[in-house]
Image (tube, rainbow, N blue to C red):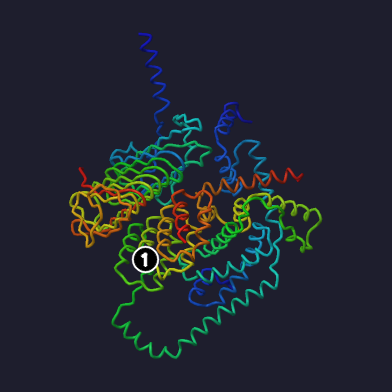
Amino acid sequence: MTEITDEILLDRLKKGDVHSLGVLYERYKTLFFNFFLRITGDYDASNDLLMETFDRIYKYSSSYKPIKKARPWIYQIASNLTKDYFKKSKRTKALEEMNLEILDDNHEFLDDGEYRNRQLMSAMGQLNARERSIINMYYLLEMSYEEISGNENISVNNARILVCRALKKLKKLLKNSGI
Amino acid sequence: MKTIKYILSILSVVYYQNTFSQIDLSVYKHVERIHVTSYWGNINAVGTFSGNEKEFTLGVTHTNNSNITKRVDDVINYVSIEEKNKILYIETRLPSGFESINLDLKIPEDILLEIKLIRGGEIFVDNFNNGVEINSLNGSVKLDRIGEYAIVNATNGEIVANFKHLNKNKPVSLITMNGGVTIELPENCRRELRLISRKNGYIESDFKIESSQKIANLNKKKYSKEAIISTAKINGGGALLFLSTENGPIAIKKSKI
Amino acid sequence: MQSIKEVKETIKKFWNMNEDQFDKEMMDYIDGVSKKAIDNEHFKEEAKELRQLLSDLKDIPLKKVETNIDEEFKRRIVKKTSKKQRSVRRIWPYFAAAASILIVFFIFIRDRSFESDYQKLKTNTDKLGFIYNLNQEQLSSNDINWLKNEIKNENNPNIKVTILDLLSNYESKLDKEFFNALEVETTPTVLMALLNIVENSNHVEYEEELLALSERKGLDITVRQKADEILSIQ
């Protein structure tokens, strides 16, 4: 069975079909929740941001233009919420402690893999807010440089450069921690 | 004789260092639009007669953190040039420290020119027939011999615009925050005016301003502390001419072209 | 085996390349846009390490959303659905009476949708002219909502300022949500246009937004002064 596209779901939502929002939620909840978690490091905040994302998708669905791709529109809402979060909380520097509970419940890890993941997340927490946002937009949400540049209000070239720099910094942080 | 030769060689070195090294853009002569993005630095763009195919070039100089300006030979390390869908994108690299990258463009006069200057610099544009759109932050914007229309947003800097002709259906919008707005129009130009000068401004006009409300300090060159916000017409009215400044005067003059 | 000349060219190219260009080339290579790596050991080593890092990041398992969060979402959906049903039930008794008036309305007065007309426009000049001409029209709440959204969606600052100039005539219909634009807008002239509207409204309600704006890092000094000026008049 062909999956209903995001564009069709948003168009239906725009016309009043609230249940389309449920379909979008099921589709994106895990991705967005982890996006927020890896940027904020805060479990409760990530849950709140997840709810707020879909509240806003519902609220602003009337402004969605069907000729535009849905995914960048939806991702922009999620990305703007992280900016709002940092403005309000003013926690734009490295996190004092990255919430590593996000890894606790996964029983499929081998010990060395689990250790590597913990180190990665810990190093991620040492990036500043913008670096964490950009890096997660790139690898987790798999946003294009055009989408990242639109969200961050920078040129496409600078989006490339900032992604590279964030990765290089992350690599350096990992090296310094012995990985 | 030896002294003269010595002086001449010194002068030629100085000239060589400070003139632009041009790169040829004629391979892009088919584009309809050029979009220039820069961070710090002056942008000088001159429209050239379309028939002259040699005149589609880009020159770059670089001013380093010690304020020394030199021409740039390896332009590709300072500027990226890319064409997509008949639009040519020229973008300078992200600056480090206080360096600035100055662009000198010679472009066929019929190409639509768009400029975005993200941090600061002066913009000077001369002789474009199909309109210009400019978004600038710090620095003045000077337009000379522009045709069709102009849409300009500046922040800290005056806007001076001279039009050789205007498309009667296209609006012109010149908006700045700190600085005056001066516009020169063809004498028979017909426009609906929206004039906003919020502080320290006055309105000056060579044209007869037709308005249902009195405009304070009109042609008196007396700075007003009160905001001047007015809708008016010249020559019976036509397309929109939106002139706005938060801080400065507005002058509407008849063009001498 | 490269000739000495080729090696020198590679070194020269690499030496002259600045960090930005290097990073750009790196990401092009990692993304598969550029197939050929720069012929340089440092570049190849870095690319290999960054590729591995990306692979490791992508391998981090995703944490599942807890069921209580799913339940919370479902509650919100139900709330949204019942809100719609309540509003339908409320207006139903009046619907029949209104229907006949609506039929007359549609027969004698052409249905106009400013938003749909606006969406057809391609150039900034067309949009500017269209927005300005709306000063001659009486805007509905839907029109105002559309224009409020347009301030967030539109890129061109001149168009945004023209929209705000238009909306300044409808101050009483502008709500707190409208002033959230103060948080996301970055262009100084547009911020000033927003602040000019705030100044004329009951700005006590927007103290939070004004404070957040005033404290924003890198904000233009004129904009900050304006925000502070409004805050001080309380």
Q: Picture quarter containing residue B107? A: top left
On the image, the x and y values in percent for residue A42 come to 68, 60
Residue at image coords 69%, 62% = C62
Viewport quadrant of the N terminus of chain C: top right
Q: Is residue C174 left or right of residue A25?
A: left
Q: Is residue B251 left or right of residue C52?
A: left
Q: Taking C151 as reference, is A154 above or below it?
A: above
Residue at image coords 49%, 83% = C87
Q: Amino acid at mark 1?
A: Tyr
On the image, the x and y values in percent for residue C165 come to 36, 61
- Residue at far top of view: B1
Q: Picture quarter containing residue A46? A: bottom right
Residue tagged 1: C118
On the image, the x and y values in percent for residue A173 come to 70, 45
On the image, the x and y values in percent for residue A58 come to 53, 71
Q: Nearer the viewer, residue A25 or B199?
A: B199
Q: Taking B73 as reference, is A76 above or below it?
A: below
